[in-house]
């Protein structure tokens, strides 16, 4: 079911469609302007998960929607980038009784190392992130988990703003709660740049 908020069409894939749309419609989540996403693409709409991540009840609700799939994957560890999405990762780790590890971010904003040695060879690692655009960041997380001998059990993200086949990209099952109908484009094709609109980096802090 697709539900339209004031600024974006939301298709709930898991959970109650109205409740999912309400989360997206919260103040500060949808931000309009001229933004450069981590993937380097430009957009006029930035989705700030921090508008949701400070609400523990909302995080528990998202975890509830994902737990059915997660249980079948039997993860022992959770790995997330040290960004605003760590709030969701922490909630899921607590709910399933798994160890939580965080990934350091390199100068490009992508995961490039793990802050602890909690992930042991043979661990079943659940990757968690907030909003995905290209899936490149999740791919880096998968590489990190495997580099220390972990097995990627699955991926959970809150929302995808583009059609990305994460499962195929990292050879593991993946779910996300909602699809968002949002456009992004290469900088060379950006009409907002041509119009001289100030550009902001889409940086989201909890």
Image (cartoon, grey):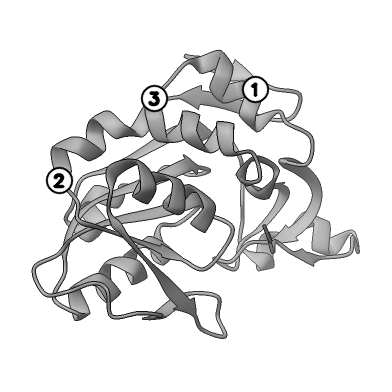
Residue at position x 48%, y 28% from top? 61
The residue wearing badge 3 is: 14
x, y percent for residue 180? 55, 35
Q: Earlier in the sequence, mark 2 or mark 1?
A: 1
Q: Nearer the viewer, residue 26 or 186?
A: 26
The residue wearing badge 2 is: 74
Q: Is residue 14 above or below residue 141?
A: above
x, y percent for residue 171? 16, 56
User: Number of callouts in the render?
Assistant: 3
x, y percent for residue 13? 40, 25
**Mark 1 neighbour density, 10 Å: few (under 14) some (14–19) many (20 or more):** few
Task: Report how far apart the C-alphas of labels 2 and 1 lie in the structure.
Answer: 30 Å
Q: Picture quarter containing residue 30?
A: top right
Left or right: 30 in relation to 2: right
Residue 158 is tagged as: none
**Residues marked 2 and 3 touching at CB (< 8 Å):** no
Point out the residue furthest to the left here: 122
Q: Is residue 184 above or below residue 105?
A: above
> Could you say whether the residue bearing mark 2 is in a helix, strand or loop?
loop
> Could you say whether the residue bearing mark 3 is in a helix, strand or loop?
loop
x, y percent for residue 106? 51, 84
Left or right: 32 in relation to 180: right
Left or right: 138 in relation to 5: left
Residue at position x 54%, y 65% from top? 39
Left or right: 37 in relation to 140: right
């Amino acid at each position: 079911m697709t539900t339209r908020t004031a600024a974006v069409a939301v298709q709930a894939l898991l959970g109650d469609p109205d409740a999912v749309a309400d989360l997206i419609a919260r103040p500060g989540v949808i931000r309009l302007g001229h933004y450069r996403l981590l993937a380097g693409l430009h957009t006029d709409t930035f989705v700030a998960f921090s508008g949701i991540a400070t609400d523990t009840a909302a995080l528990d609700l998202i975890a509830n929607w994902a737990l059915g799939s997660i249980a079948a994957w039997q993860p022992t560890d959770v790995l997330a980038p040290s960004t605003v999405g760590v709030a969701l990762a922490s909630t899921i780790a607590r709910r399933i009784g798994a160890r939580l590890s965080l990934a350091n971010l390199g100068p490009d904003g992508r995961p490039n190392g793990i802050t602890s040695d909690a992930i042991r060879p043979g661990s079943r690692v659940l990757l968690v992130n907030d909003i995905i655009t290209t899936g490149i960041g999740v791919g880096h997380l998968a590489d990190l988990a495997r580099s220390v001998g972990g097995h990627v059990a699955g991926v959970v993200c809150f929302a995808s703003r583009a059609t990305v086949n994460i499962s195929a990209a990292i050879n593991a099952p993946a779910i996300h709660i909602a699809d968002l109908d949002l456009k992004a484009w290469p900088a060379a094709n950006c009409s907002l740049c041509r119009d001289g609109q100030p550009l902001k980096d889409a940086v989201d802090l909890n």
